[in-house]
Amino acid sequence: MQGTSNLLAQSRSVEAGIGNPIGPSYYNCNESTLSGPSFKFSTISRFQKDYLAPIAPTKKFNTCKNKDLKIFTPINRKKKNQLKAIDQNNKIEKALQKKKKMVKEKKEKFLSGIECKKQRFELKQQKRQIKVIAQSWLSLVFAIGSAEFFRAKLNSQKVLFI
């Protein structure tokens, strides 16, 4: 088993392209234990940069000089909140007015539709009445006209017989 682990470690070091093995495996160690070969990690640096080195101090920018800190005072925040509340109330009032206007327009449209239907119904009723009146007038004119016609005919026959 120890021979295969040495081959495995050598193959890993060959794959990495370096002479020392990389990664955990069984390696030939100077230290020995009673149970057999020890498990040891390689201490080769795996990164080009040394991340454990102390970090160079970065340049700090003072952004407070650029800010106007008056807007963050409690008084100004209170004023800003009051203005927001007033704006919110105005928006609510406008929305309620629009809603009332829409309801009123809808009601007027509904009532105008009913009024239009009522007028059409009344016109139908009047049309029936007008039809009856017109028929009666026509029958009266026909009766008077036929009477005049017969009287004129009689007068013309009297003139012929004389």
Image (cartoon, rainbow, N blue to C red):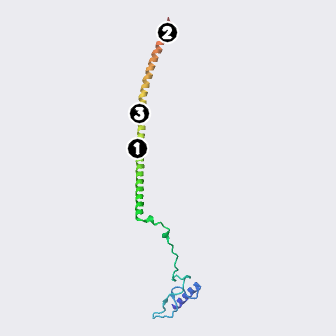
Please tell me how many numbered marks the rendered image carries: 3
Looking at the rendered structure, the kind of residue marked 3 is: Glu
Residue 149 or residue 63, whichever sits in front: 63
Labels 2, 3: front one: 3
Residue depicted at 45% across the width and 15% down the height: 147
Labels 1, 2: front one: 1
Mark 3 — residue?
A: 122
Instruction: Answer above or below: position of 35 versus 54.
Output: below
The crowding category of the residue bearing disc 1, from other C-alpha atoms within 10 Å (few below 14, some 14 to 19, many at least 20), is few
Q: Locate residue 2 relative to residue 78 in the image: left or right.
A: right
Residue depicted at 40% across the width and 62% down the height: 78
Q: How far apart are marks 2 and 3 (CA)?
A: 52 Å
Which of marks 3 and 2 precedes in the sequence? 3
Looking at the rendered structure, the kind of residue marked 1 is: Lys
Percent from the top left, x then y, of residue 107?
Answer: 40, 44
Mark 2 — residue?
A: 157
Residue 149 or residue 41, whichever sits in front: 41
Q: Distance between the residues labelled 1 and 3?
A: 22 Å
**Which mark is on residue 107?**
1
Tell me the element at label 2. Answer: helix
Looking at the rendered structure, the kind of residue marked 2 is: Gln
Labels 1, 3: front one: 1
Instruction: Answer above or below: position of 100 versus 144.
Output: below
The crowding category of the residue bearing disc 2, from other C-alpha atoms within 10 Å (few below 14, some 14 to 19, many at least 20), is few
